[in-house]
Image (cartoon, helix red, strand yellow):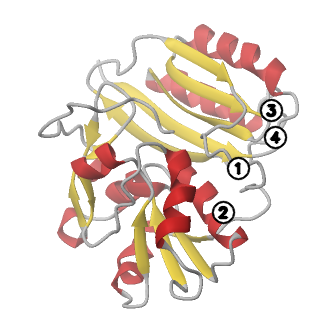
Amino acid sequence: MTYKVAALYQFVPLPDAGKLQAALRQACTALGLKGTLIVAHEGINGTVAGTTGAIDGFIDELRTGALFGGRLDRLELKFSTAAAMPFKRLKVHLKREIVTFGDAATDPARLTGTYVEAAGWNQLMASPDTLVIDTRNRFEVAMGSFDGAVDPGIDRFSDFRDFVARALDPARHRKVAMFCTGGIRCEKASSYLLSQGFAEVYHLKGGILKYLEDVPAAESWWTGSCFVFDERVGLGHGLAEQAPATTEGTIASND
């Protein structure tokens, strides 16, 4: 049996996040889904897996059902498959942030960088005045990245602000392009850079997963495997399951 996997997120004000936690758990349980969902006042984030019909039904409910009342109209979605169920259980968390950054003033729903579709990413990276930054944690970067991208050497996403203070300068780095697994961390990172005075800030729409889905391997600048936060561990071009050379020391968290 093949399972359908949906990685999703959207930054959107959800003042009723506390009530949504129980409703999301109930909806997922009824459909037999497993995985992790995070709901907060700033939005929703997570990855779930199930049968094709169950996943499709869940996404329809998120987008058009009564649960969110049409608020998830810009839901960022990536679909892939798994030969075996990639999650052991269902977890629905209520948190302060849907991806931990630790700066309350950073608000991607209000301010974010310029989205770049996967088809235009290579051209942006090729520009000599573009500084390309991988916003992921060091163990993820070690498994794979874009050729020439800067590794900030961080252990958790909340360390990215320290990297900016230490290594970046709005006067010198006028054009910054960033990427992450599915796009969510770059939403916050780009919002933060703009608030710090950086002039041109771009990020890969849909993240590495969308790039690997859309860009043919023959045209790709990606090398290695993309770490994903489930038991598949790594994905390659076409979002095919791809076991990395080593997974020692990896941590299943996108913080």
Q: Is residue 186 visible?
A: no
Q: Is residue 133 left or right of residue 61?
A: left
Amino acid type at image mark 1: Asp
Per the model, the C-alpha gap separating discs 4 and 3 is 6 Å
Q: Residues within 10 Å of mark 4 (few under 14, many from 20)?
A: few
Residue found 28% across the figure and 29% down from its top: 232
Tell me where residue 236 appears, x and y as whole percent: 24, 48
- The relative height of residue 196 versus residue 52 in the rendered view (above or below) is below
For marks 3 and 2 on the same chain, the one whose residue lies earlier in the sequence = 3
> What residue is pinned by disc 4?
70
Tell me where residue 48 appears, x and y as whole percent: 50, 26
For marks 3 and 1 on the same chain, the one whose residue lies earlier in the sequence = 3
Residue found 52% across the figure and 13% down from its top: 90
User: Mark number for residue 68?
Assistant: 3
Residue placed most toward the observer, 174 or 42: 174
Label 2 near label 1: C-beta < 8 Å?
yes
